[in-house]
Image (cartoon, rainbow, N blue to C red):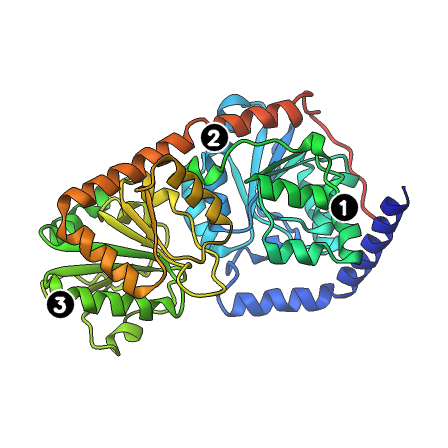
Amino acid sequence: MGASKAGETVYMIYKALTYGLSPLIHLHLRWRKFRGLEHPIRWPERLGRPSHRRPPGSLIWFHAVSLGEGMCVVPVIKRCVEQRPDLTVLMTTTTASAFEVLKPLLPCNVIYQFAPVDTPVAVNAFLEYWKPYALVLVENELWPNLVLGASANGVMLALINARMSIKSFNNWSRPVARLLASLMLSKFSLILPLSNIQAIHFQLLQASPLIINFSGDLKLGIEELVNMTNMEDLKENIAGRCVWMASSIHRGEEEVMLGVHRALMQKHPNILAIIVPRHPHFGREDLQKKGVNVALRSHGDSITSETSIYMVDTLGELKQFYRLTPIAVIGGSFLPGFTGHNISEAAAAGCAVLTGQHVGHFSNMVVAMQRLNTSSIMQVSGGLELEENLDKLLSSPEILEERRLAAKRAFHGLSNGVVENVWTLLQIHIFRNKPPSVISYNQCT
């Protein structure tokens, strides 16, 4: 009881601070809008101002911070729409890039808004207008005003695909922060951690073992249906060439990939590298300075026999490109401090998958796939080992086919039933009672 009271005291201090800082946070949002980091028209949604009429009846709110988390929850949202047509589904994210990609993937009757910043005024305005029955958070979205404001208004809370990096865990484990974390986690009805280690992290922060369940990694539950109609011309252009792809490449990693590509050009003169940067802000100039011929997708450049690198500096096409290339190198993993990216999309497409050593929480996925088949994922220590493995794959169609098949089989072995598991647990813990058609809300004071 004492710890709970102490947590409430810490929260009141946090709430007062965020209330006092609200004007600065609003100015920061405007600055982000000016820099193109917020939606140019819909950015006021981040202040809790709606841009869509709320339909009558019960509403379920799914929230994911960005594109990766949003992609993995889309199948669950579709299942919710199919199984519970009596509910209105609201989805929120915080980034404009996620909005551009996710909006077309959602069922037409799902409402999409930007999530409010974690200030009392914005969160209260959002909750008062939308009046959700339940809030399903994805991965690591523990924001005090959001979680505790929703709980104070009787909103049921679930955290799915739950994870907490070592850095976040250490921050939340500090004496004062721990009290706030414990208070927030006590409000959840369901937590679905990615692994046993993640479950231990949440329990050490005082999450009840009774609400912790396991369902598998939702990032393995991605849908495999991909529209390839706009890729036919590109497919013809790269036919007959040795093709490999480096996806989700961060600043600094392009140097690694370029060094590898140059070495491979000496052995495979007709080689083509498809590079997909994580953030499409660096492009042709960065690589042309290195003396390579670059075609830029955003400019509509054609791939010619002289093209050495095809830069995909657009959003929302990664799945299509995985189906064009037999080899995928997953970036965000080749330099210290990086934490990797989702390998399952490449494996689902039947690519031979390679990644670096710095994979963060994706290590769970890497280990799980390698347990099913040691050939499914290749982890390399750096550029030299990456070059050696790519050369081997490009030189031997038999080894390449073996690696592609191993990745796809491992993906199917792990992904089977993940979405169904999550949906079943949500039904048991969140939808066990029929949601009320009208909810009375109180302002959090």
- Verify CB contact (< 8 Å) between mark 1 and mark 2: no
Q: From what the image shows, is residue 94 above or below residue 440?
A: below
User: How many angstroms separate mark 1 from mark 2 (CA)?
Assistant: 28 Å
Mark 1 lies on residue: 182
The one of 235 and 331 positioned closer to us in this rendering: 331
**Residue at figure coordinates x 42%, y 59% from the top left:** 332
* Image quarter of residue 155: top right
- Disc 2 element: helix
The one of 395 and 216 positioned closer to us in this rendering: 395
Question: Nearer the observer, disc 3 or disc 2?
Answer: 3
Q: From what the image shows, is residue 436 above or below residue 381?
A: above
Query: Which of marks 2 and 3 precedes in the sequence?
Result: 3
- Disc 1 element: helix
Left or right of 244: which side holds 131? Answer: right
- Disc 3 element: helix
Which x, y percent locates residue 119? 72, 56
Q: Which mark is residue 266?
A: 3
Q: Which mark is residue 44?
A: none
**Residue 158, visible in the rendered structure:** yes
Query: Which of marks 1 and 3 precedes in the sequence?
Result: 1
Left or right of 152: which side holds 421? Answer: left
Which x, y percent locates residue 105? 41, 40
Q: Where does the N terminus fall, quadrant-wise?
A: top right
Mark 2 lies on residue: 418
